[in-house]
Image (cartoon, rainbow, N blue to C red):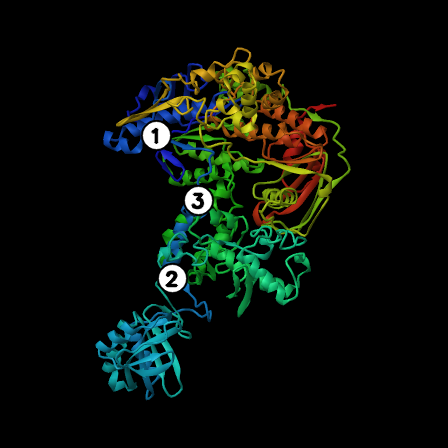
């Protein structure tokens, strides 16, 4: 079963707890759990060896997470919270004791779960691993600044150096020493001139002209000005060193560390500064600090995109999706069809000048007129309206819409967002930083360029960097480089060499974000800790599995206990101790069916052991489907790391897209193919990544994608509501004679609206009792006794069951119960077929595991009537599934393809890959070394190809597989 979310003290996705009592020496080698009954656990008692790699396995929903997270981790978390004072606990929120008699020998616990670390667009791989923080410090202390205008190296000079330079280079020449006070800003500066006059100065230089200061002096407030104080006029002579020195210091004080020297005879200006300055153009930078390189700080962020690297843009294509329409028929999407309002009146007046009208299709308008419509026109436009004529400056539709983006109204901003496209910021080119920050470099690389390198290339760049640095830089950077290399090494150890530091955390898969947190934990080098992990191998190719297992063994070897909830065969075989939980799922599970070393599990006879030992197989069909002879061809895909890829997707087959992590699978399918299909069939706004052409769209009639996002974030969401089944159930109850007599509609049977629900708990079935200094307690509602509805609603019964009884029913029972209700039966039957027979229809979405949630989504899509021409895209559907569940899922997918549909799966699991009709292997490596099609064809043909990594592992898998006719 899934696990409940508890309150916790979280630092960057990792939660640390301390035990409240010391561990006695007798049980120091074991963690003893007595009487665990959380969720579906059946009063389980067990011993887990400490300082070992322990794997919890078993069929999906058998109770692995309930034991690992909701019992062991929750108890460790609770004990840590109890070490705080009652006063502190009142702020942190309490934790209820898990349903277990006793746990002994518990170390401090760190949980590394499957959830994505952050949804914040400002959170990147660099920030959560702290590598970027060390790099910011490195650049601030050792970086060399270059001018963004001339490209020359910036210099800084002391007061003495400036004076010496003047004496050596301008001897005998007339000079005017100036203090810059305003540079490139608008304003009348009346108060500034008065202030300068009161300080005793008599002249200023304004925009290159020398002028005497007079009372009430001011300049044009709407023009950009440069203003400098004339500090001194001198003829340079070595005897006047004291005067030159005091004038220079005076000018530096008023110019805030910057001065300019004017040669009146040639009108040449020379710039000097205590800070970083370009001696050619006078551009000065502030001294670099770590926040100069932070895109989350106003001192470092690009001013155009505010440090996001992307901007929302309104373009001609985004507001005119269909140029065959005329303006009157809604060709300009944000304006809609013609109405007698001011904007259409202005457009009509503009078109009239060119002898055109708003009924002309947009594609027939001259490009010059279209440009004026979009971007405006200089001069006045005469508009005739009902109230008479008036003149106006026509600003253009794009400019008008851009102004609405800054509106105070949420509704208007939301409306405008429908017509914007996300594009890379033109100012920083996606690097997120201001131009000054990007012109501070080490070894000719700025921090933005380094952040865009994948981790493998970044490691190469940092290798032997000392040889390319000066002696002074090396002295400062020694410790920083040690820390950076160590952290990069940990990311390489867990198989994340294809990521880059710039990558936004919200685009990572659950497995990737978990492995990043694992790398961070390895970096802390803690000892004596109990780590609990939730399927860290998700999204990992077999090649990288070995690295992950080595990283976990490293954690164990330095003196920690590691518990991993896992289905992966390699992980189970490398464990020191395995716990097999089962025998079934949900109410049929919750027992320890086998415990011991991997060899002991082999001989236990459990379902897991039968698959591990080869007694049971996921059989491979001997004959592959021929398909329908048609295909979709995507040509010239070049997004991210794809190397001008052309791929043929045969229709009417089960297609598996494979390849090592980061090879370009998601770029090809999620970011290129799916957005193209989605835009074609449903007019979706999302832009696909670059490609040249696509052919064959006429052979399918819709596309459906099932990804890994959760089905609901509130306890009110459940499988019945998500699949749409609950609407049909409520309609069924509303049609019963008793309901009709009472005048009940379907809304009466909803627990989310007033009417039929219990108003004491507002349909939640539970009430939260605040306990001040103790944890809040959830208790069944005293009015409805946890049934969610009021007494009158529950009196309406179908086959003797009330609406609450139906929600508490397992999917298995619901299949029998609704056998004569085809609409409901279709949906509930598919839930059962994908292996979810054990969950209840009303189970809270927040208690479903990742694999369960994805299968609910899959069942929802499978329940929709297919046409035999539907194209399904499934993203790692085997996530969180046991061998037996994969067999069930494989059967369901094959039924779908047998009806003529096409199913494309992105997959690493060999049990799923081997039953596909057609494989497309992307690679050969991750990142820049990937992005090409390595192999394609049926599994047996791909296994014979010597290129790439998938073929080698597939060949081994097929050699031990059984075939079926």
User: Of residues 670 and 33, which is closer to you in this image?
Assistant: 670
Q: Locate the C terminus by quadrant.
A: top right
Sequence-first disc among 3 and 2: 3
- Viewed as shown, does residue 570 lie left or right of 133? right
Q: Nearer the viewer, mark 2 or mark 1?
A: 1
Res. 608 mark: none
Q: In which quarter of the image is residue 285?
A: bottom left
**Callouts 1 and 3 close, C-beta under 8 Å:** no
**Callouts 2 and 1 close, C-beta under 8 Å:** no
Which residue appears farthest toward the top when viewing the image? 800
**Percent position (x, y) of residue 607?**
57, 18
- Viewed as shown, does residue 236 lie left or right of 730? left
**Percent position (x, y) of residue 333?**
59, 51
Res. 120 mark: 3
- In this rendering, is residue 243 above or below 475? below
Sequence-first disc among 1 and 3: 1
Q: What element carries label 2?
A: helix
Q: Is mark 3 on a helix, strand or loop?
A: loop
- Residue wearing tag 1: 108
Report crowding for label 2: few under 14, some 14 to 19, many 20 or more residues within 10 A (C-alpha): few
**Percent position (x, y) of residue 138?**
39, 55
User: Of residues 361 and 868, which is closer to you in this image?
Assistant: 361
Q: Quadrant of residue 245?
A: bottom left
Distance between mark 1 and mark 3 Cα atoms: 29 Å
User: Of residues 178 and 381, which is closer to you in this image?
Assistant: 381
- Residue wearing tag 2: 471
Q: Nearer the viewer, mark 1 or mark 3?
A: 3
């Amino acid at each position: 079963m899934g696990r409940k979310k508890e309150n916790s003290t979280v630092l960057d996705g990792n939660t640390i707890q301390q035990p409240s009592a010391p561990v006695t020496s007798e049980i120091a080698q074991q963690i003893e759990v007595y009487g665990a009954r959380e969720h579906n656990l059946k009063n389980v008692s067990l011993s887990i060896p400490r300082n070992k790699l322990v794997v919890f396995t078993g069929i999906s929903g058998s109770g692995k997470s309930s034991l690992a997270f909701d019992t062991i981790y929750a108890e460790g978390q609770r004990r840590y919270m109890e070490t705080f004072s009652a006063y502190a606990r009142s702020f942190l929120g309490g934790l209820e004791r898990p349903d277990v008699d006793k746990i002994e020998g518990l170390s401090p616990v760190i949980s590394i779960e499957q959830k994505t670390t952050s949804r914040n667009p400002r959170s990147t791989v660099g920030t959560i691993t702290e590598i970027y923080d060390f790099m910011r410090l490195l650049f601030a202390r050792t970086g060399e600044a270059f001018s963004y205008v001339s490209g020359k190296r910036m210099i800084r000079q002391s007061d003495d150096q400036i004076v010496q330079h003047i004496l050596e280079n301008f001897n005998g020449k007339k000079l005017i020493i100036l203090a810059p006070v305003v540079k490139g800003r608008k304003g009348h500066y009346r108060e500034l001139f008065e202030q300068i006059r009161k300080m005793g100065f008599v002249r200023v230089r304004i925009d290159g002209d020398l002028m005497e200061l007079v009372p009430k002096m001011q300049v044009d407030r709407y023009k950009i000005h440069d203003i400098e104080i004339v500090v001194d006029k001198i003829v340079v002579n070595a005897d006047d060193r004291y005067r030159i020195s005091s004038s220079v210091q005076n000018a530096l004080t008023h110019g805030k560390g910057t001065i300019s020297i004017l040669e009146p005879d040639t009108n040449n200006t020379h710039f000097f500064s205590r800070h970083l300055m370009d001696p050619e153009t006078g551009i000065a930078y502030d001294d670099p600090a770590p926040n100069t390189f932070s895109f989350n700080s106003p001192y470092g962020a690009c001013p155009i995109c505010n440090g996001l690297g992307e901007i929302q843009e309104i373009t001609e294509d985004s507001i005119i999706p269909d140029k065959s329409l005329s303006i009157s028929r809604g060709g300009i999407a944000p304006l809609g069809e013609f109405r007698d309002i001011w904007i259409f009146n202005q457009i009509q007046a503009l078109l009239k000048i060119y002898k055109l009208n708003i009924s002309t299709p947009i594609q027939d308008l001259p490009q010059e007129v279209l440009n004026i419509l979009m971007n405006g026109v200089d001069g006045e436009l005469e508009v005739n309206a009902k109230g008479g004529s008036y003149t106006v400056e026509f600003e253009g539709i794009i400019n008008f819409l851009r102004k609405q983006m800054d509106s105070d109204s949420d509704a208007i901003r939301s409306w405008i967002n429908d017509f914007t496209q996300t594009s890379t910021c033109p100012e920083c080119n996606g690097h997120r930083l201001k131009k000054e920050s990007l012109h501070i470099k080490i070894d000719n690389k700025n921090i933005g360029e380094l952040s865009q390198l994948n981790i493998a290339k970044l490691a190469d760049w940092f290798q032997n960097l000392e040889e390319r640095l000066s002696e002074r830089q090396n002295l400062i950077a020694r410790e920083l480089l040690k820390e950076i290399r160590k952290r990069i090494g940990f990311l390489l150890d867990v198989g994340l060499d294809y990521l880059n530091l710039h990558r936004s955390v919200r685009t990572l898969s659950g497995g990737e974000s978990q492995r990043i947190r694992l790398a961070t934990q390895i970096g802390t080098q803690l000892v004596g800790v109990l780590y609990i992990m939730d399927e860290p191998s998700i999204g990992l190719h077999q090649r990288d599995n070995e690295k992950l297992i080595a990283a976990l063994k490293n954690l164990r070897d330095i003196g920690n206990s590691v518990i991993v909830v896992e289905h992966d065969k390699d992980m189970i075989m490398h464990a020191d101790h395995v716990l097999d939980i089962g025998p079934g799922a949900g109410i049929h599970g919750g027992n320890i069916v086998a415990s011991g070393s991997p060899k002991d599990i082999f001989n236990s006879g459990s379902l897991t052991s039968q698959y591990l030992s080869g007694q049971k197989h996921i059989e491979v069909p001997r004959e592959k489907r021929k398909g329908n002879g048609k295909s979709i061809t995507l040509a010239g895909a070049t997004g991210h790391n794809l190397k001008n890829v052309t791929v043929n997707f045969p229709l009417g087959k089960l297609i598996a897209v494979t390849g090592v992590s980061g090879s370009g699978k998601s770029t090809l399918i999620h970011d290129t193919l799916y957005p193209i299909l989605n835009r074609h069939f449903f007019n979706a706004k999302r832009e696909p990544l670059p490609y040249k052409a696509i052919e064959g769209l006429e052979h399918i009639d819709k596309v459906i994608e099932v990804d890994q996002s959760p089905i609901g974030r509130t306890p009110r969401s459940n499988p019945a509501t998500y699949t749409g089944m609950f609407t049909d159930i409520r309609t069924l109850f509303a049609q019963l004679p008793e309901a009709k007599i009472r005048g009940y509609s379907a809304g009466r049977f909803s627990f989310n609206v007033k009417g039929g629900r219990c108003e004491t708990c507002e349909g939640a079935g539970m009430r939260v009792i605040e306990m001040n200094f103790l944890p809040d307690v959830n208790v069944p509602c005293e009015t409805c006794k946890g049934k969610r509805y009021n007494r009158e609603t529950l009196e309406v019964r179908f086959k003797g069951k009330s609406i609450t009884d139906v929600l508490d029913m397992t999917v298995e029972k619901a299949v029998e119960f609704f056998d004569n209700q085809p609409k409901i039966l279709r949906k509930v039957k598919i839930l059962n077929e994908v292996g979810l027979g054990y969950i209840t229809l009303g189970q809270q979405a927040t208690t479903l595991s990742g694999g369960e949630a994805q299968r609910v989504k899959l069942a929802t899509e499978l329940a929709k009537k297919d046409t035999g021409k539907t194209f399904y895209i499934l993203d790692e559907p085997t996530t969180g599934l046991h061998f037996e569940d994969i067999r069930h899922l494989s059967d369901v997918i094959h039924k779908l393809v047998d009806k003529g549909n096409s199913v494309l799966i992105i997959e690493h699991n060999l049990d799923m890959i081997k039953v596909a009709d057609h494989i497309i292997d992307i690679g050969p490596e991750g990142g820049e070394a990937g992005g090409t099609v390595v192999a394609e064809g049926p599994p047996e043909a791909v296994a014979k190809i010597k290129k790439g990594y998938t073929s080698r592992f597939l060949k081994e898998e097929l050699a031990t597989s059984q075939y079926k006719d």
